[in-house]
Image (cartoon, coloured by chain):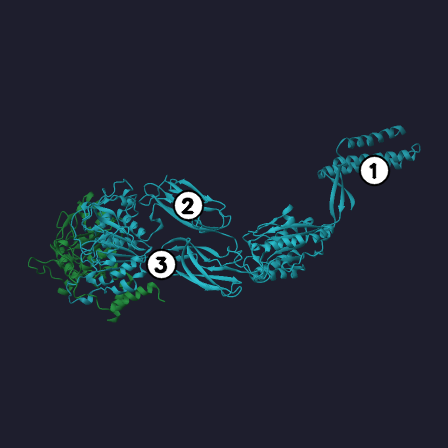
């Protein structure tokens, strides 16, 4: 250790001041020098030297004040070698493994702690050699470990990623500061770093370590024997189409379980919907399984691949993998079959054709069997009615079947009625519209279809040519098909046109299909004293049915002084409601809920947006809405909840922070008139697939390669090795050899001493000259 | 594996060659009181509003005979000012001379009639010799459908295959080889027939044809009836026959012949 000094200016005057000061100093020195050289004989040599010295001292004091000079004294110490220890804190470190199957497993974390503890001696030697030890933990980020934690490295590793490359790259930044330059790196890890177990990730790691330019000593803490099964990969599209088969493929990887049977399940929103049995193959050999699903409704769903637990597994955290699939509707396929062209058919066809989301296939019976077969048959543009194709082979391709005043029996459709019943049971939607033909032939009275209909048409009801203005039932006031009648002035059907004719049908006696009357005749009652239904619905099996005991709803769209409801034609609102309800459209209710994304990274904020609408689907402001977020797991408690009141646009939103990794269900509910509850699911997922592959063999090889490439030492913890006494360090840079240990600064210009020196120098010279008689 | 669209196409095509499924035991559709009939109303106005008396009655009869439509046996008449104008989204307007000026309420009603989706058929009884009726119909349409353009209805329009395959829109005369119309968002909202369709349809009390059709005679009358049928099928089914399944089947049928 030694000391060095230097002068440092605290203030540098302007250029002009510097020139003036320099000139003055030069003149003062020149004048003093000339006075010394041409001194008279009566001035002795010692006095002349003293005067010259005092002049130079005065000039120096003036410069010290002008430049605010400081005397800097540095104590120089020997250079320090900094060694950074990177400790893996990702979740895979908590996995227990062993040297061989059957041996007692030990967690990798335990090996880290043991190696560190048993290396206390070598670490002490390093310090004696002037090596400083800087301990940092890494998972998805790198952070310092200090104090007691740095001495023991004890922790519970739960990190969701192992970004060793990022942790080393952080040290590259330190290299920009010479005093913090790293001499060596020591890595304690299982080597399962960089996310995917790929060569590209390894190459990138080696590149970054190479740029650091110092030896990287690695301690591999994994062991070769492991007992575990993991969902290694899932391949599924983010979107699927309703009623279309979508394939989901998953890869299952197992270790130490060859020949064992495993059950792999597919869950949707927490509900088990499919399962495959699998006999597991050898260590690390991929087992691929495909699931085929045909989503039965639109919406956002959390699907999950789950492998049932096998006894003795190293971890269960990798047995499940969730992902989000948004199920969309392709164009809605509607089959519109009408028994007779009329204005009602025209109105419905026009409405459906106008909707770009509807693919409409129509078959209308244009000729009756007793119509004259004239000699001009060739001039007809008619085509045969393809009953078999429509009602047998292709029926399942439709979303909605509309039988519009259609007499099934004369057109050989009666034999396919059971197919239509199966179609509804399987999730299809059926609309049955009355009139003079629709219910006239008993075609819909077969047991299979009759038990699905909300009305009883086993006895063919006649057509009554009576004007009728239906009334809303209590259920109809809340139902999406008819609730719009209370929007606007709230008078229901009163301001709307009357219907021309109706079929006197009765509500079915069955109580297991949710049959309800939405619109009823104002006066007429059925055999059981209930109002005769004009519009009724039911939900048999997975499907939905709407019946209209009238073929004149077109009146709601064609009338003088037609009362619009929130700016829309009543006819449009009625059929919009019918189609939305039949298709289970999320927006068929008066409350909708969205998330800004289907999947979030851990730490990202989740945004919920709710919209409320009037019964006529116009934005509805000032509606109180309750909301909550809860994990999809059964019996889970809400993690967040609250209440909103929608704004002028019928909108409300909430941003939720810091949700833990997992699948969630967001629920919003509005009460009172239009009350409903809607849900949305989403997942919060880790940034990597930390536990997708936990077999340490590849990681150990990666650790060995990292050490060999950088000139470090490779240590295998499972073999009982510890850190070496002589850890490899790099050549320190030239400019980092001298290190300033301490510094002292003395201000030469400040304080009274500077003034005393100035007065002494100037005054002393003046007094001396006066004494010898030259002043 | 064929897509569902392909399957539907194949289904429609295959059906073209199949036998029309007419069951032997199938009975006729209900008629009379139980039938949900439609009206073919004619506009009543000051002046000679019914130059071809009973033309709509004959058309109604032919529709009942040839199609499954069930028009009233005696179609009604309505005025432009009446609420009954909105009882049916179809209106037949005939005349031999220029239409009179309608009241403001009447024109407002006719404008709303078109706005709500109604179809008006103007039929010039002059058969193309005078043009006054046609010109007044154009002027009326200019007021009740402002901004709309009256253009020729092309020969490939679905109107000409809505029931029959009609090549030329003839009536009592064949002076014009096309009809005029207003095309509004893919549909025809008004038609102007200048070849006197009503003249071809009209029958006397004895059931005999009142006006000879020229130059085609009886055959031309048949084509006029077919055109009338097509207009009503278009009114009730709109562009049903333009659906792909129908077009492809018809095209295949024609090639086969």
Q: Secondary structure at mark 2?
A: strand
Would you say A104 lies left or right of A482 here? right
Mark 1 belongs to which subunit? A
Look at the numbered discs 2 and 3 and tell me whether their residues touch, using CB distance below 8 Å.
no
What residue does disc 1 label? Answer: A30
Check the image and report above or below for B203 versus B101.
Answer: below
Q: Earlier in the sequence, mark 2 or mark 3?
A: 3
Camera-nearest residue between A414 and A651 = A414
- Marks 1, 3 in one chain: yes
Q: Determine whether, in the image, residue A545 is placed left or right of residue A709.
A: left
Within 10 angstroms of label 3, few (less than 14), some, or many (20 or more) residues?
many
> Which chain did the image draw in green?
B
| Residue behind mark 3 | A243
Q: Which chain is cyan?
A: A
Report the Cα–Cα distance between label 2 and label 3.
28 Å
Residue topped by disc 2: A609
In the displayed orientation, state which residue is furthest to the bottom. Answer: B257
Q: Secondary structure at mark 1?
A: helix
Q: For residue B223, what is the image quadrant?
A: bottom left
> Where does residue A28 sit, x and y in percent of width and height?
81, 35
**Residue A4 visible in the picture:** yes
């Amino acid at each position: 250790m030694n000391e060095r000094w230097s002068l440092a200016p605290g203030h540098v005057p302007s250029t002009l001041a510097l020139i003036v000061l320099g000139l003055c100093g030069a003149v003062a020195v020149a004048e003093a020098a000339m006075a010394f050289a041409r001194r008279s004989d009566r001035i002795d040599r010692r006095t002349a030297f003293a005067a010259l010295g005092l002049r130079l001292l005065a000039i120096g004091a003036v410069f010290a004040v002008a430049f605010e000079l400081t005397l800097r004294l540095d104590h120089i110490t020997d250079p320090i070698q900094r060694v950074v220890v990177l400790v893996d804190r990702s979740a895979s470190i908590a996995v227990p493994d062993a040297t061989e199957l059957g041996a007692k497993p030990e967690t990798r974390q335990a090996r880290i702690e043991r190696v560190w503890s048993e290396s206390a001696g070598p670490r002490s030697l390093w310090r004696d050699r002037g090596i400083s030890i800087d301990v940092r933990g890494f998972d998805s980020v790198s952070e310092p470990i200090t104090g007691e934690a740095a001495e023991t490295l004890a922790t519970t590793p739960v990190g969701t990623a192992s970004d060793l490359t990022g942790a080393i790259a952080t040290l590259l930044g330190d290299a920009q500061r010479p005093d913090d330059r790293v001499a060596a790196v020591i890595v304690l890890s299982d080597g399962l770093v960089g996310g995917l177990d790929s060569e590209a990730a390894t190459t990138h790691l080696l590149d970054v370590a190479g740029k650091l330019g110092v030896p990287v000593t690695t301690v591999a803490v994994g062991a070769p024997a492991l007992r575990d099964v993991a969902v290694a990969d899932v391949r599924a599209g983010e979107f699927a189409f309703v009623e279309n088969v979508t394939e989901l493929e998953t890869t299952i990887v197992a270790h130490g379980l060859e020949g064992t049977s495993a059950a792999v399940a597919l869950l949707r929103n927490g509900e088990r919907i499919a399962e495959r049995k699998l006999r597991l193959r050898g260590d690390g050999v991929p087992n691929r399984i495909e699931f085929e699903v045909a989503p039965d409704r639109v919406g956002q769903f959390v699907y999950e691949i789950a492998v049932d637990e096998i006894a003795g597994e190293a971890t269960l955290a990798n047995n499940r993998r969730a992902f989000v699939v948004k199920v969309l509707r392709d164009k809605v396929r509607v089959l519109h079959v009408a028994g007779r062209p009329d204005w009602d058919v025209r109105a419905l066809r026009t409405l459906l054709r106008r909707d770009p989301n509807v693919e409409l296939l129509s078959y209308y019976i244009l000729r009756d069997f007793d119509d004259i077969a004239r000699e001009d048959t060739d001039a007809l543009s008619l085509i045969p009615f393809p009953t078999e194709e429509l009602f047998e082979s292709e029926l399942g391709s439709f979303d909605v079947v509309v039988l519009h005043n259609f007499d099934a029996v004369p057109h050989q459709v009666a034999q396919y009625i059971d197919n239509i019943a199966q179609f509804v049971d399987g999730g299809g939607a059926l609309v049955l519209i009355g009139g003079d033909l629709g219910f006239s032939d008993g075609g819909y009275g077969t047991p299979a279809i009759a038990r699905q209909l909300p009305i009883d048409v086993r006895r063919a009801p006649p057509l009554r040519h009576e004007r009728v203005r239906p009334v809303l039932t209590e259920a109809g006031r809340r139902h999406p098909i008819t609730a719009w009648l209370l929007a606007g002035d709230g008078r229901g059907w009163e301001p709307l046109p009357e219907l021309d004719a109706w079929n006197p049908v009765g509500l079915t006696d069955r109580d297991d299909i949710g049959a309800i009357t939405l619109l009823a005749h104002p006066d007429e009652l059925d055999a059981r004293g209930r109002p005769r239904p004009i519009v009724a619905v039911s939900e048999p099996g997975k499907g939905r049915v709407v019946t209209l005991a009238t073929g004149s709803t077109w009146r709601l769209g064609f009338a003088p002084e037609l009362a619009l409801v929130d700016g829309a034609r009543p006819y449009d609102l009625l059929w919009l409601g019918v189609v939305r309800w039949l298709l289970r459209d999320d927006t068929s209710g008066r409350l909708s809920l969205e998330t800004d994304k289907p999947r979030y990274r851990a730490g990202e904020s989740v945004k919920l947006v709710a919209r409320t609408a009037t019964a006529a689907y116009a934005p509805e402001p000032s509606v109180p809405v309750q909301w909550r977020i809860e994990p999809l797991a059964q019996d889970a408690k809400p993690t967040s909840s609250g209440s909103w009141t929608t704004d002028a646009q019928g909108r409300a939103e909430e941003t939720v922070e810091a949700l833990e990794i997992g699948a969630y269900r967001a629920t919003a509910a509005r009460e009172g008139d239009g009350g409903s509850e809607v849900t949305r699911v989403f997942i919060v997922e880790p940034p990597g697939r930390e536990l997708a592959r936990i077999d340490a063999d590849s990681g150990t090889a990666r650790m060995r390669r990292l050490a060999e490439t950088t000139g470090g030492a490779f240590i295998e913890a499972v073999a009982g090795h510890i850190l070496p006494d002589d850890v490899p360090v790099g050549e320190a840079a030239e400019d980092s050899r001298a290190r300033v240990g301490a510094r002292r600064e003395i201000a030469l210009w400040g304080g009274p001493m500077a003034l005393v020196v100035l007065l002494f120098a100037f005054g002393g010279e003046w007094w001396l000259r006066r004494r010898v008689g030259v002043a | 594996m064929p897509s569902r669209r392909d399957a539907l196409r194949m289904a429609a095509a295959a059906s073209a060659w199949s036998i029309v499924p007419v069951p032997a035991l199938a009975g006729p559709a209900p008629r009379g009181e139980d039938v949900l009939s439609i009206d073919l109303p004619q506009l009543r106005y000051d002046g000679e509003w019914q130059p071809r008396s009973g033309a709509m009655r004959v058309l109604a009869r032919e529709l009942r005979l040839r199609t499954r439509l069930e028009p009233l046996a005696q179609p009604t008449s309505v005025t432009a000012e009446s609420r009954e104008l909105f009882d049916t989204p179809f209106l037949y307007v005939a005349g031999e001379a220029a239409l009179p000026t309608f009241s403001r309420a009447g024109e407002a009603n006719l404008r709303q009639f078109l706005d709500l989706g109604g179809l008006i058929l103007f039929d010039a009884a002059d058969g193309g010799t005078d043009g006054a009726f046609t010109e007044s119909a154009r002027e009326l349409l200019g007021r009740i459908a402002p901004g709309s353009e009256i253009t020729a209805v092309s020969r490939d329009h679905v109107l000409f295959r809505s029931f029959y395959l009609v090549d030329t829109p003839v009536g009592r005369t064949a002076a014009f080889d096309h009809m005029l119309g207003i095309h509004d968002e893919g549909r025809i909202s008004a038609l102007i027939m200048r070849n006197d369709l009503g003249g071809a349809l009209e029958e006397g009390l004895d059931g005999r044809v009142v006006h000879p059709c020229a130059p085609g005679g009886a055959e031309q009358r048949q084509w006029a009836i077919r055109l009338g049928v097509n207009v009503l099928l278009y009114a009730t089914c709109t562009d049903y026959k333009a659906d792909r399944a129908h077009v492809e089947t018809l095209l295949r049928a024609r090639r086969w012949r």
